Image: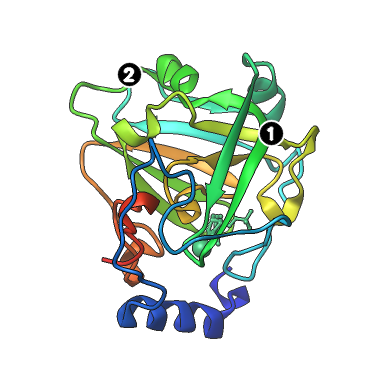
Amino acid sequence: MADAFNDKLIARKQEWARDGRLLTGATADPARDRLPPGQRLVRDWPVLDLGAQPEVTPARFRLDIDGAVRRPISMTLDEFMALPQQESVSDMHCVTQWSRYDNHWRGVSARALLALVEPHDAARHVIFHAHDGYTTNVRLDQFDQPDVFLVHGWDGKPIERRHGGPVRVLIPRLYLWKSAKWIRRIEISAADKPGFWECRGYHNNADPWLEERYG
Ligand SMILES: Nc1nc2c(c(=O)[nH]1)N[C@H]1C(S)=C(S)[C@@H](COP(=O)(O)O)O[C@H]1N2
Ligand SMILES: [Mo]
């Protein structure tokens, strides 16, 4: 699917990372400052991806959670939707400087999924693999948080295809590139494996309040 990618856009973002564009040099305290440094609020919800928006029909949908776990699982969309569902409200922060407050999500919590698969004691990292070939990585302790979900609903409606529907990851306290759209596989791992943007100059940790845009 790589030939469908928007190579010019990818090259420009990589250049921005190399040049440290958008960096203010400031940090902020998430307990006090709702808006991270260098961010501005938007009301709409911008669309960002590699230029390919895969159509994940219910028939094509499959969610595997595997790797360093005792009980790997592979779910259909119906099986995923039959898991306990929760509502959550959180903010989004994109490295391209927009933030959007008070998004209403519906989905399955990361903690419920981790309880199902039972990670090995040696597990430290999570690598997300998406239908468009995109990958991104977080530490297991960043995924294992009460505000992290695999979401399928936004503002009372199914998440649109362009925003990663039917199911995407949501990790609200990290820059949004860590929240993989069109999720296909969640790999639990003892070793870290930097993803698409992490291999192209983006920060491995991605904390917006520390302005970890590039690294
Ligand atoms: N599968 C996949 N997930 C992805 C991306 C992508 O290209 N493919 N882009 C990431 C980036 S860089 C951002 S900023 C957010 C954008 O999500 P949105 O389009 O819903 O705003 O998705 C992230 N997740
Ligand atoms: Mo992004």
Number of marks present in the image shown: 2
For the residue marked with disc 1, what is the amino acid? His
For the residue marked with disc 2, what is the amino acid? Arg
Q: Secondary structure at mark 2?
A: loop
Q: Quadrant of residue 190?
A: top left
The relative height of residue 8 versus residue 213 in the rendered view (above or below) is below
The residue shown at (70%, 45%) is 165
Q: Is residue 76 left or right of residue 205?
A: right
Dot 1 alpha-carbon crowd within 10 angstroms: few under 14, some 14 to 19, many 20 or more: some
Disc nearest the viewer among 2 and 1: 1
Which residue position is annotated with label 2? 70
Q: Residue most toward the right?
A: 157
Q: Earlier in the sequence, mark 2 or mark 1?
A: 2
Please tell me the numbered disc located at residue 62: none
| Inter-mark Cα distance, 2 to 1 | 33 Å
Query: Residue 77: percent from the left, percent from the top?
Result: 69, 30
Q: Residue most toward the left?
A: 122
Q: Secondary structure at mark 1?
A: strand
> What is the quadrant of the C terminus in the image?
bottom left
Does mark 1 have its CB less than 8 Å from ligand 1? no
The relative height of residue 70 versus residue 103 in the rendered view (above or below) is above
The residue shown at (66%, 21%) is 79
Q: Is residue 89 left or right of residue 201?
A: right
Query: Residue 129: percent from the left, percent from the top?
Result: 47, 49
Dot 2 alpha-carbon crowd within 10 angstroms: few under 14, some 14 to 19, many 20 or more: few
Please tell me the numbered disc located at residue 104: 1
Q: Quadrant of residue 151?
A: top right
> What is the quadrant of the N terminus in the image?
bottom right
Q: Nearer the viewer, residue 116 or 8?
A: 8
Q: Nearer the viewer, residue 60 or 24?
A: 24
